[in-house]
Image: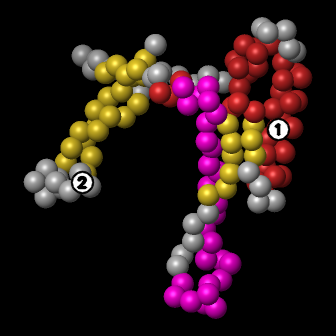
């Protein structure tokens, strides 16, 4: 299987932006969304009841939030790691810096070995335009 993409025109931010102000860039085309219930059903095919899977996922969501809020990184098995990424407005001196200058944190996910391999092995195919 391969990921479908289409080309979209965007402003060129590269070094050659004066010569070529607009370029074409790849953008993924998603066919549909795999819903949570569908995933639960697929996991239950392995013999684990879907209500137990949902209970574990709900608890992991709670625990990841709890540990991130405590300033910890969270390893979620071979799935990957979660951590906060923080940015702020700058200040000239340490005394001028206020906590409210910190922006809302991002949650950064770093994939584990299996997902990194999947990413590396991804193929691409241009989506044909409809007539």
**3D distance between C-alphas at marks 1 and 2:** 41 Å
Residue drawn at x 32%, y 34% as measured from the top left:
26
Residue beneath label 1, please? 60
Residue drawn at x 67%, y 37% as measured from the top left:
80
Residue 10 included in the magenta stretch of the image = no
Residue beneath label 2, please? 14
Residue drawn at x 84%, y 18% as measured from the top left:
50
Q: Which mark is residue 78?
A: none
Residue 130 placement: quadrant: top left
Helix, strand or loop at mark 2: loop
Q: Is residue 62 left or right of residue 10?
A: right
Q: Is residue 74 above or below residue 33?
A: below
Which sits in the foreground, 54 or 93? Answer: 93
The stretch of residues the image draws in magenta is: 91-117
Q: Is residue 100 left or right of residue 61?
A: left
Q: Is residue 41 above or below residue 16?
A: above
Residue drawn at x 50%, y 28% as measured from the top left:
119
Q: Earlier in the sequence, mark 1 or mark 2?
A: 2
């Amino acid at each position: 299987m391969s990921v479908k993409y289409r080309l979209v025109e965007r402003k060129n931010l590269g070094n050659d932006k004066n010569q070529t102000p607009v370029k074409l860039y790849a953008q993924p085309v998603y066919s549909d969304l795999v819903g949570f219930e569908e995933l639960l059903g697929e996991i239950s095919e392995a013999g684990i009841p879907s209500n137990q899977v949902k209970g574990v996922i709900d608890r992991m969501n709670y625990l990841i939030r709890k540990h991130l809020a405590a300033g910890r990184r969270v390893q979620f098995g071979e799935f990957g790691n979660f951590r906060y990424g923080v940015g702020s407005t700058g200040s000239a001196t340490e005394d001028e810096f206020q906590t409210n200058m910190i922006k809302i944190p991002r949650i950064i996910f770093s994939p584990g070995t299996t997902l990194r391999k999947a990413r590396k092995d991804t193929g691409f195919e241009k989506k044909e335009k409809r007539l």
